[in-house]
């Protein structure tokens, strides 16, 4: 299995979301740790989050808790850790 870096996967995700007419915004906060890496905003007001990980890496406990909180609020959180998961997310966004 080929290992892809988080940086590479983030670039692919941003490029493809932008090509669909959406925005893929980097999230950083000094007050709320554990936020997913990217906020995805699509035409038609669809909003979701993406946690990007290097292939084979897992979310830490705080990231899992934060993602569960976002999902409890009704947001979808995708974990992207290889080229296949990037393409699956893009395909999902195309159907929305």
Image: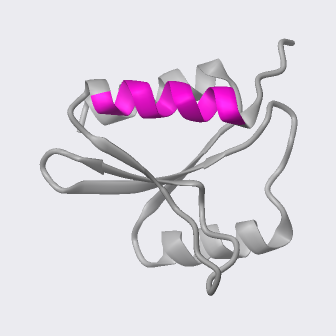
Left or right placement of residue 10 versus residue 39 in this view: right
Left or right placement of residue 64 versus residue 47 in this view: right
Place residue 32 in its image quadrant.
bottom right
Task: Check residue 17 for magenta coloring.
Answer: yes
Relative to 25, say whether 31 is above or below: below
Relative to 51, say whether 68 is above or below: below
Residue 75 image position (x, y, % from top left): 41, 65
48 or 92: nearer the viewer: 48
Residue 29 image position (x, y, % from top left): 59, 75
Residue 81 image position (x, y, % from top left): 71, 34
> Residue at image x 57%, y 78%?
69
Left or right placement of residue 14 versus residue 53 in this view: left
Left or right placement of residue 60 versus residue 15 in this view: right
> Residue at image x 12%, y 49%?
44
> Residue at image x 73%, y 67%?
64
> Residue at image x 63%, y 19%?
83
| Extreme-bottom residue of the structure | 31
């Amino acid at each position: 299995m080929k290992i892809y870096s988080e940086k590479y996967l983030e670039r692919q995700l941003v490029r493809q979301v932008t090509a669909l007419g959406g925005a893929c915004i980097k999230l950083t906060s000094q007050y709320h740790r554990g936020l997913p890496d990217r906020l995805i905003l699509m035409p038609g007001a669809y909003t979701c989050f993406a946690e990007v990980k290097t292939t084979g890496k897992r979310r830490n406990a705080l990231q899992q808790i934060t993602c569960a909180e976002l999902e409890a609020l009704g947001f979808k959180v995708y974990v992207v850790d290889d080229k296949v998961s990037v393409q699956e997310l893009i395909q999902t966004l195309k159907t929305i």
